[in-house]
Amino acid sequence: MTKKINDEEKIKQLEKVAMQIEKMRLGDYVANLNRPSKIILNNLIGGISKGVGLTVGATLVIALLFKILSVIISMNIPYLTDMLQEVVTIVKSTPIAANMAPAETEKTCQCAGQGQNG
Protein backbone atom coordinates (compact mmCIF):
# COMPACT_ATOMS: atom_id res chain seq x y z
CA MET A 1 0.00 0.00 0.00
CA THR A 2 2.78 2.45 0.91
CA LYS A 3 4.71 1.49 -2.22
CA LYS A 4 1.72 2.44 -4.35
CA ILE A 5 1.45 5.83 -2.59
CA ASN A 6 5.16 6.48 -3.09
CA ASP A 7 4.84 5.61 -6.78
CA GLU A 8 1.93 8.03 -7.16
CA GLU A 9 3.88 10.79 -5.42
CA LYS A 10 6.86 10.16 -7.66
CA ILE A 11 4.64 10.31 -10.73
CA LYS A 12 3.16 13.63 -9.55
CA GLN A 13 6.65 15.02 -8.92
CA LEU A 14 7.79 13.89 -12.36
CA GLU A 15 4.74 15.54 -13.93
CA LYS A 16 5.57 18.77 -12.09
CA VAL A 17 9.16 18.63 -13.32
CA ALA A 18 7.96 17.91 -16.86
CA MET A 19 5.63 20.93 -16.74
CA GLN A 20 8.43 23.16 -15.44
CA ILE A 21 10.73 22.00 -18.23
CA GLU A 22 7.98 22.67 -20.74
CA LYS A 23 7.43 26.17 -19.33
CA MET A 24 11.16 26.90 -19.59
CA ARG A 25 11.12 25.75 -23.23
CA LEU A 26 14.23 23.73 -22.56
CA GLY A 27 13.63 21.68 -25.70
CA ASP A 28 13.88 24.79 -27.89
CA TYR A 29 17.08 25.80 -26.13
CA VAL A 30 18.66 22.38 -26.67
CA ALA A 31 17.55 22.42 -30.33
CA ASN A 32 19.24 25.82 -30.81
CA LEU A 33 22.50 24.52 -29.33
CA ASN A 34 22.81 22.24 -32.34
CA ARG A 35 22.52 25.19 -34.76
CA PRO A 36 25.35 27.67 -34.09
CA SER A 37 24.37 29.81 -37.09
CA LYS A 38 20.98 30.47 -35.46
CA ILE A 39 22.69 31.49 -32.20
CA ILE A 40 25.07 33.83 -34.04
CA LEU A 41 22.20 35.41 -35.99
CA ASN A 42 20.13 35.92 -32.84
CA ASN A 43 23.07 37.50 -30.99
CA LEU A 44 23.91 39.72 -33.98
CA ILE A 45 20.35 41.02 -34.27
CA GLY A 46 20.16 41.53 -30.51
CA GLY A 47 23.44 43.45 -30.43
CA ILE A 48 22.45 45.70 -33.32
CA SER A 49 19.08 46.49 -31.76
CA LYS A 50 20.70 47.29 -28.39
CA GLY A 51 23.21 49.60 -30.05
CA VAL A 52 20.57 51.44 -32.05
CA GLY A 53 18.33 51.74 -29.00
CA LEU A 54 21.15 53.10 -26.88
CA THR A 55 22.10 55.65 -29.53
CA VAL A 56 18.55 56.87 -30.10
CA GLY A 57 17.82 56.97 -26.36
CA ALA A 58 20.97 58.88 -25.50
CA THR A 59 20.30 61.36 -28.31
CA LEU A 60 16.77 62.00 -27.08
CA VAL A 61 17.91 62.45 -23.47
CA ILE A 62 20.68 64.88 -24.43
CA ALA A 63 18.34 66.85 -26.70
CA LEU A 64 15.77 67.05 -23.90
CA LEU A 65 18.47 68.16 -21.46
CA PHE A 66 19.58 70.98 -23.77
CA LYS A 67 15.97 72.04 -24.28
CA ILE A 68 15.43 72.21 -20.51
CA LEU A 69 18.69 74.15 -20.11
CA SER A 70 17.64 76.65 -22.78
CA VAL A 71 14.29 77.19 -21.01
CA ILE A 72 16.11 77.75 -17.69
CA ILE A 73 18.49 80.19 -19.37
CA SER A 74 15.59 82.10 -20.90
CA MET A 75 14.07 82.52 -17.40
CA ASN A 76 17.07 84.72 -16.61
CA ILE A 77 17.70 83.48 -13.05
CA PRO A 78 20.67 85.55 -11.76
CA TYR A 79 23.45 83.08 -10.86
CA LEU A 80 22.09 79.96 -12.52
CA THR A 81 21.72 81.56 -15.95
CA ASP A 82 25.34 82.72 -16.08
CA MET A 83 26.65 79.33 -15.05
CA LEU A 84 24.48 77.45 -17.55
CA GLN A 85 25.44 79.81 -20.37
CA GLU A 86 29.09 79.02 -19.69
CA VAL A 87 28.37 75.30 -19.81
CA VAL A 88 26.49 75.62 -23.10
CA THR A 89 29.25 77.71 -24.71
CA ILE A 90 31.91 75.22 -23.58
CA VAL A 91 29.93 72.32 -25.04
CA LYS A 92 29.31 74.16 -28.31
CA SER A 93 32.97 75.22 -28.65
CA THR A 94 34.42 71.74 -27.99
CA PRO A 95 36.03 70.54 -31.23
CA ILE A 96 34.88 67.26 -32.65
CA ALA A 97 37.46 65.20 -34.55
CA ALA A 98 35.19 64.92 -37.61
CA ASN A 99 34.89 68.71 -37.88
CA MET A 100 38.59 69.45 -37.44
CA ALA A 101 40.59 70.84 -40.32
CA PRO A 102 43.01 68.37 -42.00
CA ALA A 103 46.07 70.25 -40.67
CA GLU A 104 44.77 69.97 -37.11
CA THR A 105 44.04 66.27 -37.60
CA GLU A 106 47.62 65.56 -38.72
CA LYS A 107 49.02 67.31 -35.65
CA THR A 108 46.84 65.43 -33.21
CA CYS A 109 46.92 61.99 -34.84
CA GLN A 110 50.42 60.57 -35.13
CA CYS A 111 49.66 56.89 -35.49
CA ALA A 112 52.03 54.27 -34.04
CA GLY A 113 54.95 56.66 -33.66
CA GLN A 114 55.08 57.53 -37.37
CA GLY A 115 55.73 61.04 -38.58
CA GLN A 116 53.14 63.49 -39.85
CA ASN A 117 53.33 62.23 -43.43
CA GLY A 118 53.20 58.52 -42.55
Image (tube, rainbow, N blue to C red):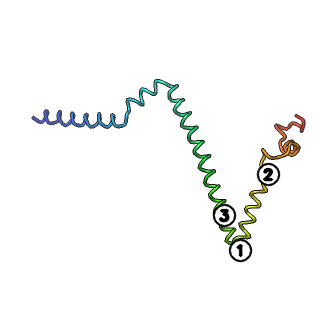
Q: Earlier along the polypeptide chain: callout 1 or callout 2? A: 1
Q: Which residue carries the number 1 mark?
A: 79
Q: Which residue carries the number 2 mark?
A: 95
Q: What is the x, y in percent for residue 34?
A: 46, 24
Residue in view at x 60 percent, y 42 percent: 52
Where residue 26 sits, quadrant-wise, is top left
Secondary structure under tag 2 reads loop
Q: Residue furthest left?
A: 1
Marks 2 and 3, how far apart at CA: 21 Å
Marks 3 and 1, how far apart at CA: 14 Å
Q: Left or right? Give the position of 34 relative to 111.
A: left
Q: Residue furthest top?
A: 34
Residue in view at x 13 percent, y 33 percent: 4
Q: Residues within 10 Å of mark 3 (few under 14, many from 20)?
A: some
Q: Left or right? Give the position of 87 relative to 22.
A: right
Q: Amino acid at mark 1?
A: Tyr
Q: Amino acid at mark 3?
A: Leu
Q: Which residue carries the number 3 mark?
A: 69
Q: What is the x, y in percent for residue 53?
A: 57, 45
Q: Residues within 10 Å of mark 2 (few under 14, many from 20)?
A: few
Secondary structure under tag 3 reads helix
Q: Nearer the viewer, mark 3 or mark 1?
A: 3
